[in-house]
Image (cartoon, grey):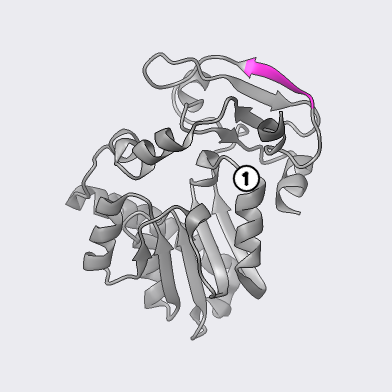
Amino acid sequence: DRRQRQMCIRDRIYTQTKNKGRNNNNKVLNYICKKCGFIAIYPRINTSTKDILYKEGEFSISARQSSVLTTEKIKKSEFTSYRYFNILSNVLNDELYQKNKKCLEVGCGSGSFLRYMKASGWEVEGIEPDKKFSDKGKVIYDLNIHNDFFEDFVTEKKYDLIASFHVIEHVDKINDYLQKMYNLLNEGGIIYLECPSIDYIYGDDIDFFFWDVHINTCLLYTSDAADDLLC
């Protein structure tokens, strides 16, 4: 199937590896690529379901524990974003504090990571489909946040850093998604991603780890998967 082959670049043979997971006792049909080990849910979610999940707040209720941004949630988000910022500082060192560089965050929530980048002198911009979160970020951090999906985002700008944390596991057409990121980079620019990995299962067990909204599961130590998805 053409959509199934979107998961990996070359034609692959997939086999079902797990049919259980989190959320409403729904079966989560996970398939693993026999060549690279990449795991994906199939069939993929449709457009209307995607809009309900991410634009209408259903995902925020489930994953963020609230459809509105509370003070407690802001504190937790800022704590997590500070960890992302510290990791980046170890990579960029003094370059992190150079002026006139542009950063785009995909799936920025209220913009707590962008707040740190802005304080470091970067020109920042965010994309967040949940309007309640993006609107709050505009107010509390004075940020430029587009209320949209990255796939529908249109710009003539180029960026020195494109960051995205725990988003790619929700993306249907991963190859198109990463190619678009690459096309928006300035020469020498960096793509900074974080996502769940089957190598480090979180939660009580594998049934909690596999989740119907996580339609992709990456592997940290499978180089073929990384090469295929990022080349």
> Is residue 113 toward the left or the right of residue 102 in the image?
left
Q: Is residue 170 magenta?
A: no
Residue 122: give x, y in percent of width and height.
Answer: 45, 78
Amino acid, disc 1: Ile
Q: Quadrant of the N terminus?
A: top right
Q: Quadrant of residue 94?
A: bottom right
Q: Quadrant of residue 221?
A: top right
Residue 209: give x, y in percent of width and height.
Answer: 49, 27
Which residues are drawn in magenta?
13-17
Residue ID at (54%, 44%): 195
Name above or below for residue 141 compared with residue 4.
below
> Is residue 163 toward the left or the right of residue 117 in the image?
right
Residue 171: give x, y in percent of width and height.
Answer: 54, 42
Residue ID at (65%, 17%): 17
Instruction: State the residue lying farthest toward the bottom.
Output: 99
Q: Main secondary structure of the magenta part?
A: strand
Q: Is disc 1 surrounded by few (<14), some (14 to 19) or many (20+) residues within 10 Å?
A: some
Q: Which residue is mark 1?
A: 174
Secondary-structure class at tag 1: helix
Relative to the observer, which residue lies in front, 10 or 205? 10
Name above or below for residue 174 compared with residue 198.
below
Residue 188: give x, y in percent of width and height.
Answer: 68, 74
Q: Quadrant of the C terminus?
A: bottom right
> Is residue 180 toward the left or the right of residue 37 in the image?
left
Name above or below for residue 36 compared with residue 77.
above
Q: Is residue 15 magenta?
A: yes
